[in-house]
Amino acid sequence: MRANKNPQAVNLGAGTLAGQRVDSILPEISAYPAKITLSAAAESYLSQLAADLELGRCDFRQLSPALRELYTFGYEAGRESLAGIVVNLNAECDRLYLRAYNTPAQIAEIHQRRLDVAFEAEAERLFGVSA
């Protein structure tokens, strides 16, 4: 791909856009400034829109495709960043529930049953035999 003479231009890569072949529809990271800013009116509008979404005064379906994409990206990024914490908290809840409603002997029996099931599944997977 040849060098772009316009520093504000975005590399559009493989595909066609307005009849011209391009390499990608994604902008190069360097095409954006270090901090993206909006006008005061746009900042205010988006801030109010975010508040209205949170309060239920605006529905996700009312957003434009670009705003839905940005919202979804933020949601997924947040969800992924907390996934490990959620898994750990669920395991801790399960552990505490087990302790709260079972005696130590019952807990040992439950753990042994779980191990037996896991070992049987692993033996079936590795050796094709069921215990």
Image (spheres, grey):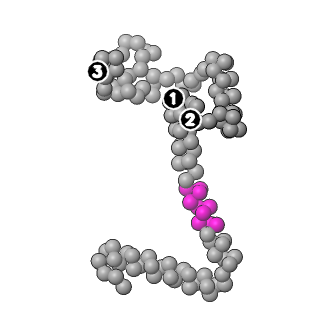
Q: Identify the residue shown where x is 64% and y is 66%.
A: 93
Q: CA distance from mark 1 to mark 3?
A: 23 Å
User: Considering depth in this image, is 114 or 63 the residue closer to the camera?
Assistant: 63
Q: Quadrant of residue 64 in the image?
A: top right
Earlier-in-chain disc, 3 versus 2: 3
Residue 34 on image: x %, y %? 54, 25
Tally of marks: 3
Q: Which class describes the residues within 10 Å of circle 1: few (<14), some (14-19), or many (20+)? A: few
Q: Which residue is mark 2?
A: 61
Image coordinates of residue 98 in percent, x first then y, are: 63, 75
Return the disc, 2 or 1, that comes first in the chain's sequence.
2
- In the rendering, which numbered label is found on residue 66? 1
* Residue 9 place in picture, x, y as percent: 42, 16
* Badge 1 element: helix
> With 5 as the anchor, is 55 left or right in this view?
right
Q: Tag 3: Cα neighbours inside 10 Å, few (<14), some, or many (≥20)? A: few
- The quarter of the image holding the C terminus is bottom left
